[in-house]
């Protein structure tokens, strides 16, 4: 392989002119990729799920690093030939798995600039614009979602980290001096702390509790009602029972838009319980949060302004490229109390008059993520975002109608936001057991995904094996949804 002579003949980085030339090739590649995925000729859209087998990629990449630098042309060729064909294309209109997302073009442009500035907003002095833009743009987002504009927020990478920070706050508020004294070896002095969430809560809550030393078994899963909402009475009973047994309830996690079904807890009811019991309320709206911009969906969010903390992920349903998660918190002073720690080299003369974001979380280094949210919100505008969210919800309704009209399929839960839960229940298998239906649906899922033209995943709701169809990509249109349903029904005819 020809080496790149610049890598040893000169010090420093690629010359700007050469950068420009390669940037043009990269941008042309992105342009062509976006053109292909958004092509009205659906046959031209690349498959969303590759036929990659474990180990396939490693086979094509040398296990030792190159000793001499390689040419950009070679690197880009391998990107096209090895990486792209072996990558699940999340930025593809036929992606209906997990939660479908979009790296919008404006978000992609922002990512270029974020990388070019390579700013690290540990403290205000190391990232003045990043720190101040974060405050402003999170105010914009809060206002658009019907929350107070001055609600304090902070950007993290993922909801998992945002939620861990929130539960760390709850632990701090519990007043057991975990920060200074830790938890281990303190015997009866530290009661076992408990966190409550519905049985449909995302696994990130359990992981946060594992990380924070609370223990997975202290996440109490409260049963849900027929609308898949946490039962407030059961929550109250669990708290009372736990207090009597010597546990210390510290946090309740309510969800708006559960991962499995899109269902939402009754946040008002949870807020009243938490206020009475003096327990931290964290609302996980990681996926559905942006839908709070839509007046007709506001009822799902009612009461969330009373939560102590809220997580919303613009990288899920707000067209911002991965990753960007927002933690709103009504008590940033508690976050600061839990995490502020300033070694000498990070002290600055402005400390008394500015916000240093490192004070509010586990991370010191931070990417300039607010830039991409700013770009996205400016490019689409709140009205533009709302119309796109409404379109996704309408497409989900369309898919649900197709399911309802087909004799061999049924909805397993009411459609919430842009997520449809459904399953194959063929008339030919009338009266089939749940085990048989699970086998049929698992096989259907497997066969559809093996084709790779569309991608979807399953969940289990009350032990019922359920397929999920999630819409959230800006390139997804009615044609994609109709074609997806045709593929599903077509494949289903081969599943016995
Ligand atoms: C409701 C909900 N909360 C939290 C998460 C975790 O998100 P992240 O991948 O940003 O940690 C997800 C992921 O899909 C989710 O659906």
Image (tube, rainbow, N blue to C red):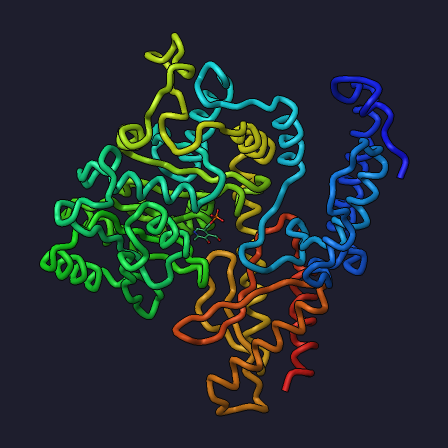
Residue, x 42% and y 15% (percent of image)? 345
Q: In screen coordinates, is 435 left or right of 62?
A: left
Q: Is residue 375 toward the left or the right of residue 35 in the image?
A: left
Image position, residue 116 (x, y; %): 65, 24
Residue 170 x, y percent position in the rendering: 26, 42
Position of residue 425 measured from the top left corner of the image (x, y, whole percent): 54, 82
Drawn side of residue 370 relative to residue 338, left or right: right
| Above/below status of 413 relative to 365 | below
Please identify the residue farthest to the top as the structure is shown. 349
Q: How many marks?
A: 0
Task: Pick the quarter of the image with the C terminus.
Answer: bottom right
For the N terminus, the image quarter is: top right
Q: Nearer the viewer, residue 127 or 261?
A: 127
Say above or below: 307 vs 478. Answer: above
Q: Establish if 430 lies above or below 214.
A: below
Residue at screen point 72% across, 61% down? 52
Q: Residue at x 53, y 29 (%)?
A: 367
Out of 145 and 78, give the one closest to the viewer.
Answer: 78
Q: Residue at x 44, y 45 (%)?
A: 159
Residue 124 sits in quarter: top left
Q: Nearer the viewer, residue 49 or 146?
A: 49
Q: Position of residue 56 (x, y in %)?
A: 74, 58
Residue ranking furthest to the right: 2
């Amino acid at each position: 392989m020809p080496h790149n002579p610049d890598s040893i003949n000169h010090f420093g980085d690629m010359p700007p002119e050469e950068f420009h030339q390669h940037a043009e090739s990269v941008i042309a590649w992105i342009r062509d990729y976006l053109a292909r995925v958004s092509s009205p000729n659906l046959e031209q859209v690349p498959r969303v799920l590759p036929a990659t087998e474990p180990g396939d990629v490693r086979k094509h990449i040398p296990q030792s690093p190159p000793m001499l630098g390689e040419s950009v042309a070679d690197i880009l060729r391998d990107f096209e030939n090895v990486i792209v064909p072996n990558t699940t294309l999340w930025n593809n209109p036929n992606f209906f798995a997990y939660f479908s997302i979009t790296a919008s073009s404006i978000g992609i442009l922002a990512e270029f600039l974020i990388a070019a500035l390579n700013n690290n907003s540990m403290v205000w002095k190391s990232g003045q614009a990043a720190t101040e833009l974060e405050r402003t743009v999170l105010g914009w987002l809060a206002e658009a979602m019907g929350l107070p504009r001055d609600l304090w927020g902070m950007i993290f990478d993922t909801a998992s980290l945002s939620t861990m920070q929130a539960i760390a706050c709850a632990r701090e508020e519990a007043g057991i001096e975990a920060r200074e004294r830790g938890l281990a070896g303190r015997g009866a002095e530290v009661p076992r702390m408990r966190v409550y969430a519905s049985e449909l809560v995302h696994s990130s809550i359990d992981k946060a509790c594992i990380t924070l030393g609370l223990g997975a078994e202290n996440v109490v899963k409260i049963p849900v009602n027929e609308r898949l909402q946490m039962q407030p009475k059961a929550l109250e009973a669990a708290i009372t029972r736990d207090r009597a047994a010597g546990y210390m309830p510290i946090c309740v996690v309510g969800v708006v838009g559960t991962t499995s079904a899109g269902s939402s807890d009754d946040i008002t009811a949870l807020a009243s319980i938490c206020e009475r019991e003096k327990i931290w309320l964290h609302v996980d709206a990681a996926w559905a949060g942006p839908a709070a911009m839509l007046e007709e969906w506001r009822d799902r969010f009612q009461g969330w302004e009373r939560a102590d903390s809220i997580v919303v992920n613009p990288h899920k349903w707000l067209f911002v490229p991965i990753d960007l998660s927002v933690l709103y918190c009504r008590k940033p002073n508690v976050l600061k109390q839990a995490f502020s720690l300033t070694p000498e080299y990070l002290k600055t003369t402005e400390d008394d008059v500015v916000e240093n974001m490192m004070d509010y979380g586990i991370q010191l280094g931070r990417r300039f993520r607010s830039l991409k949210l700013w770009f996205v919100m400016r490019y689409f505008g709140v009205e533009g975002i709302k119309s796109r969210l409404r379109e996704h919800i309408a497409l989900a309704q369309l898919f649900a109608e197709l399911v309802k009209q087909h004799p061999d399929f049924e909805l397993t839960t009411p459609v919430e936001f842009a997520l449809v839960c459904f399953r194959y229940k063929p008339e030919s298998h009338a009266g089939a057991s749940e085990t048989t239906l699970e086998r049929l649906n698992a096989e259907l899922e497997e066969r559809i995904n093996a084709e790779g033209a569309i991608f979807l995943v399953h969940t289990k709701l009350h032990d019922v094996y359920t397929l999920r169809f999630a819409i959230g990509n800006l390139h997804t249109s009615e044609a994609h949804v109709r074609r997806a349903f045709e593929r599903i029904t077509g494949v289903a005819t081969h599943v016995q």
